[in-house]
Amino acid sequence: MGGDIVRVGREMRLISRPAQRIPAPGDVELVEVPVPDPGPRQVLVRNLYMSIDPGGLLRMSDLSKLDIPHFEVGEAMWSDAIGEVVESDHPDLRAGDIVWHRLGWRDYAVADGAEFRKVDPDAYPSLSHHLCFGIVAYIGIAVAGVKPGDTVLVASAAGGVGSIAGQIARLRGATTVVGSVGSPEKVEYVTGTLRYDAAFDYHDGMYDQLVALGLNDRLDVYFDSVGGGLLEAAIDVMRPRGRIVMCGQTEQVRSGVPTGPRNMLKVVGKRIGIQAFYTFDHPDLLPKFEAEFTEWVRGGEVVVAETVVDGLENGIDAAVGQLQGRYTGKVILRF
């Protein structure tokens, strides 16, 4: 950037670790910072969209004992983002390219070009779809080994991961797909727009709802992202040698209190398999995901549910609202 003009951007910094799961006003601060010109092999990117992740509030805590990456006090927070290259000193990227990266929570990102991955701006109906949790859902269904004839239960079925997991389970041949959600409106959404076979509001009871839907001793796969009472209920109704895959535990994130199931002996008795996963454990599935998922979305076989919130200044409130179940689908912040 030539001349004496100084580019200024904003970034969200963690000032202190919250005493509770919901940050107090002084725990974070949106500050203005000068944006440096890119150095050798670096790239300057203007962010367009950012992912509001379920784990964002959790990362404000010290998670070093859990081997989970967390935000550092005094530094800018981070999240997946989609942006446009403004200036580049990297041979593989040029101004105007659209890139995916992990330097969200700021207006501008400057880093080595290797930190940015160029994406096809025409791959999806919206650039924001590059931030959807399709890859998490895709890998989870693969790890669970969903096959034709399976009965599948999906937690948080109107959320960013669950809204897609059930649709992929159907495409893999599942006979019955059931979702757990947090309101009557979301029941209508997942059984209508997302084409789940059935759904229930977990506030009305979990085990009883599963039995009422005919899942007792019929559940083959449970896609878990919440833990707690729903995990316990799923274990109760699961058939022998059923499979559980886990990508999160939002019930514990929300309450701050461990809420493990009380019926783990049934896991042994039924020989239930439980497998947690991270997406980066399965790089071999990424090319398959990119090929299949893009076509599913373009062809209307998968609906990408999103709620878009405008303005970096509204990011923390959006993260809190997501944890409280205020939104439907993947929560995206638009800069």
Image: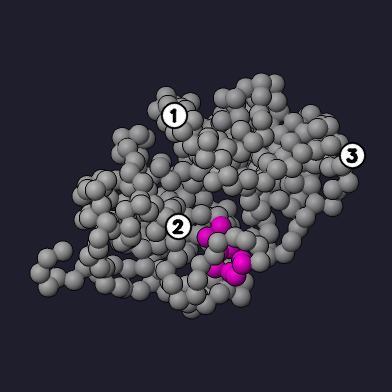
Q: Going by the image, does 144 lie left or right of 164?
A: right
Residue 1: image quadrant is bottom left
Q: How many marks?
A: 3
Query: Which residue position holds label 2?
Result: 79
Question: How many neighbours does mark 1 have within 10 angstroms: few (below 14), some (14-19), or many (20 or more)?
Answer: few
- Cα distance in 3D space between marks 1 and 3: 40 Å
The residue at 10%/69% (across/down) is 3
Q: In this view, does 157 lie to the left or right of 76?
A: right
**Cβ–Cβ below 8 Å for labels 3 and 2?**
no
Earlier along the polypeptide chain: callout 2 or callout 1? 2
- Predominant SS along the magenta part: loop
Task: Give how far across and how far down residue 153 sits, in percent.
Answer: 69, 36
Disc 3 crowd rating (10 Å Cα; few below 14, some 14-19, many 20+) is: few
Q: What stretch is highlighted in magenta?
A: 55-64
Q: How far apart are marks 2 and 1 (CA)?
A: 24 Å
Q: What residue type is labelled 1?
A: Ala
Q: Alpha-carbon distance for marks 3 and 2?
A: 41 Å
Q: Which residue is drawn at 84% across and 42% down?
A: 267
Residue 291, which numbered label? 1
Question: What is the number of the mark on residue 269?
Answer: 3
Identify the residue at image location x=61%, y=67%: 64
Relative to residue 298, is residue 111 depicted above or below?
Answer: below
Q: Callout 1: helix, strand or loop?
A: helix
Please tell me whether residue 108 belongs to the stretch shown in magenta: no
For the question of whether residue 333 can be seen, the reply is no
